[in-house]
Amino acid sequence: MAISAKDVKALRDLTGAGMMDCKKALNETDGDMDAAVELLRKKGQAKAEKKADRIAAEGVSLVAQKDDKTAAIVEVNSETDFVAKNEKFINFVTAVAEQALDAESEDMDAFLASAWKADTSKTVNDALVEQVAVIGEKLSIRRIKKVTADNGVVVSYVHGGGRIGVLLSAETETVNDAVKEALSNVAMQIAALNPKYISDADVDEEYIKHETEILKAQIENDPKESQKPEKVKEGMIQGRIKKELKEVCLLDQAYVKAADGKQTVAKYLEEVSKEVGATVTIKEFVRFETGEGIEKKEEDFAEEVAKQLM
């Protein structure tokens, strides 16, 4: 049967696939729109499999917030920074973040197998596969995290259009604009200085042990320091560990907006607590930096273009 340009455009609007792909799908299904959509989805699956060995290290980390009590953050990766800035991709990641708000589990397999909110006949993975077909790159939902605050508030901060995303949960009896602004400032601090822990009370013993071993090795490999008495060496190690903890523990970090450059985050929150008449206590934070820990593949651009033309 004859396939009209109107039908091709309608299928393109439904799927986002290329015009020629849409025309071919309609021809193969005798103009059946639903069958054509399903065919393109299946072809999208094939494309996704072909791209499975590629490295997706770009992308964005975005947040979704239901109210002052619940928020979710997701990292979705793409192969190129160009796609990471694409409106279709950003809209998809935003939908994934909204999906994460209602997720029953942060297990990725369970999340991918859950029903897609926009169309419950599909799974999250089905929606991901469709985006691979539309965008033409390997995409990956890498991680999700939901944060709640039963007796306080959750704030979020996204830096650089999604390069870094932060969720911060605090316990407080008073939730007003002043508290939210203060916590937003702390969330920006987390984005900028990347603390590992809230306070030194949360530091893992294995972390201390590991850092101590490194410092011992550094001292023994130093011609001058290695000659010092063992008691002095131990003092040096303890001093350096204490200094390092001030860098990795949020409350011990120097507050980036401190007027004197010395006020710690802990002192800043004490100040805010006095102003609002209620103690503000940090309970949890999550920081996603897009692509962290993923080994990026370096390729010659001219060579990549040549590959595409072959």
Image (cartoon, grey):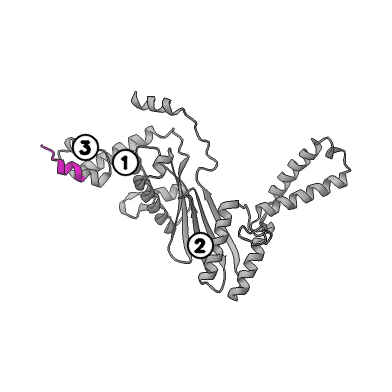
In the image, residue 138 above or below residue 299? below
State left or right for residue 85 relative to residue 270.
Answer: left
Mark 1, residue position: 134
Identify the element where label 2 is drawn: strand
Q: Percent position (x, y) of residue 38?
A: 25, 42
| Badge nearest the viewer, 3 or 1 | 1
The residue positioned farthest toward the bottom in the image shown: 277
State left or right for residue 197 relative to residue 154.
Answer: right
Q: Give the range drawn in magenta.
A: 1-10
Mark 2, residue position: 155
Identify the element where label 1 is drawn: helix
User: At label 1, which amino acid type do we have?
Assistant: Val
| Real-space CA distance between mark 3 and mark 1, rounded to the nearest whole angstrom | 14 Å
User: At label 2, which amino acid type do we have?
Assistant: Val
Q: Percent position (x, y) of residue 222?
A: 80, 36
Mark 3, residue position: 25
Q: Percent position (x, y) of residue 217?
A: 77, 38
In the image, residue 157 above or below residue 87? below
Which sits earlier in the primary sequence, circle 2 or circle 3? 3
In the image, residue 160 above or below residue 64? above
Q: Assign the magenta stretch its main secondary structure.
A: helix
Asked whether the residues under the numbered discs 2 and 3 touch, taking CB atoms below 8 Å apart as contact, a structural biologist would say no
Residue shown at 53% from the left, 66% from the top: 181
User: At label 3, which amino acid type do we have?
Assistant: Ala
Residue shown at 17% from the left, 36% from the top: 27
Residue shown at 39% from the left, 41% from the top: 83
Residue 293 has which mark?
none
Q: In which quarter of the image is the N terminus?
A: top left
